[in-house]
Amino acid sequence: MKYKNIIFDFGNVIGKFKGDYILGKFASTPEDYDILADAIFKNWVALDAGTIDYDQNAEDTIAGLPDHLKDTARDFFENWFQYVDPLPETWKFIKELKARGVPIYLLSNASTRFAERALEDHPILKEFDGIVFSAPLKMAKPGHDIYYHLFNKFNLLPRECFFIDDTVENVIASKELGMESILFTGDIDAVKRAIEF
């Protein structure tokens, strides 16, 4: 294999994260969906970056909604995690890597609440040699500091690592730091070809 370590993003690489799909599990009408989407996703980037508190943001968001949507929004903030469905081909690939003894790491933007629940909700993460979530560190991709944190914490050399992410900016940042990367579209075979697996 061409690389010593494989680094995974989480959303849309290991688990399916589609905001419209997830919110659709909670909103009962298109009108309610639009109101909830505007309110709930407004601060999502800040939640991932850890610059605002998850619970306080939830309460502030709920307070600003019409009364008939307050319970729906509360339900969303407490339970949206269960609709991040596994991507089976990636889970299979992770197990194949581990069977060969390849070290694997996670580098993912995620809120503090997701980070707290991740190992429980997604048992595949127990296979990983190291996990870095953004919000607890108050840094996020594509900022270079979180990549450096990963390298330093686990003593990794960028040139020995290969990164799989579904966002163009994160792939570009990875390459700027000397870590080869692929923009993931769901094609595990393309990843395998890139790393000569």
Image (cartoon, grey):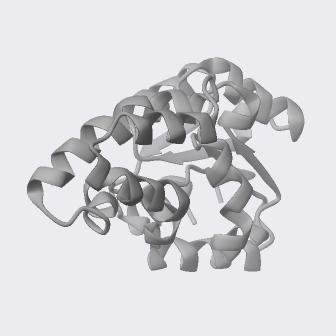
Q: Which residue is pictured at 62% across the width and 33% down the height?
A: 179
Q: Left of 15 or right of it: where is 167?
A: left
Residue at 69% across / 27% down in the picture?
146
Residue drawn where x is 81% and y is 70% of the image: 101
Task: Locate the N terminus by quadrant.
Answer: bottom right
Image x and y of residue 42, in percent? 36, 31
Q: Quadrant of residue 149?
A: top right
Q: Give the percent coordinates (x, y) of residue 191.
A: 46, 59
Is 102 or 59 nearer to us in this picture?
59
Q: Choose top left, top right, bottom left or bottom right for residue 121.
A: bottom right
Residue 4: % across, % down: 75, 52
Q: Is residue 27 above or below residue 106?
A: below
Residue 67 in picture, x, y percent from top left: 30, 48
Given residues 36 and 167, the one toward you in this image is 36
Relative side of 92 to 31, left or right: right
For the point 27% across and 43% down, the residue is 66
Look at the image and tell me whether residue 185 can be seen: yes
